[in-house]
Amino acid sequence: MALHFLVESSSDAAVGDLVSLTGAEAKHAAVVRRLRVGEAITIGDGAGVWLSGVAEAVSPSQVDVRISERTAQPAPVPRIVLVQALAKGDRDELAVQAACELGVDEIVPWQASRSISRWEGSKAVKGRERWASIVREAAKQAHRAWVPQVAAPVSTAQLATRAASQRLLLLDPTAETRLSEVAPDGRDLVLVVGPEGGITPEELARLTDAGAERVLLGDTVLRTSTAGPAAIAVLSVALGRW
């Protein structure tokens, strides 16, 4: 499979055009991935545009690619959204990386009651940027035409408002309905994953009162780093993506 890279200026590129990778992407292609002249690669803009071409010039500062094919992939509908509670260490980052590789369409950081990690002030900005960087790299590795957006952190109250237009599915080991039994109804599917200590009874009550559904992923209790990705795999089958 050809190497894949992301640029922000490929939306108007046509067959026969020369598209250049610069900055970090060029250095990664030339130094890390050891791209060579004549090698086939693909380029995306993260918003559906998919370009195929051949490298004509390669250096750590710029890689020129002659485009041989252009396609545009529509955004998935309905979308799968992961609301990931902030977690200690790198557990939330592991969840974000795997979720992107498995096909999530949006990621929402959640400041849950039991989240040990706290995003406040400048830390919230840096945390979101960190997650966006992880998502971008995971999307390249997975050859995704659409790069998931990382939303601003939300509170439980803000999360409850999503239930009015989206289908909130709370991963709860005490729920009676299995996630595999959920039939998509056309609305976006929003998976809510709690932190290490789980979702509090108060949060469960507030979200279910707003219209969220409690669902069981399986008979075992998964870590916060694996629950979201596992649930995304289940929904991908239900939506016919896999």
Image (tube, rainbow, N blue to C red):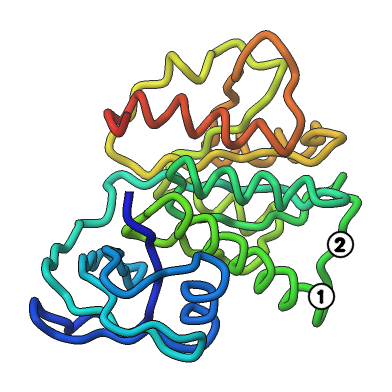
CB atoms of marks 2 and 1 within 8 Å: yes
Relative to 233, does residue 20 appear above or below in the rendering? below
- Label 2 or label 1, whichever comes before in sequence order: 2
Indicate the amino acid at tag 2. Answer: Arg
**Res 67 quadrant in image:** bottom left
Alpha carbon separation for disc pair 2 and 1: 8 Å
**Which numbered circle lies on residue 118?**
2
Q: Secondary structure at mark 1?
A: helix
Indicate the amino acid at tag 1. Answer: Lys
Q: Nearer the viewer, residue 134 or 74?
A: 134
Quadrant containing the C terminus is top left
Which residue lies at the image location 71% right of the left edge and 53% below the top edge? 93
Q: Secondary structure at mark 2?
A: loop
Q: Nearer the viewer, residue 5 or 62?
A: 62
User: What residue does disc 1 label?
Assistant: 123
Q: Is residue 90 left or right of residue 158?
A: right
Which residue lies at the image location 33% right of the left edge and 42% below the top edge? 187
Task: Residue 106: give x, y in percent of width and height.
Answer: 48, 55
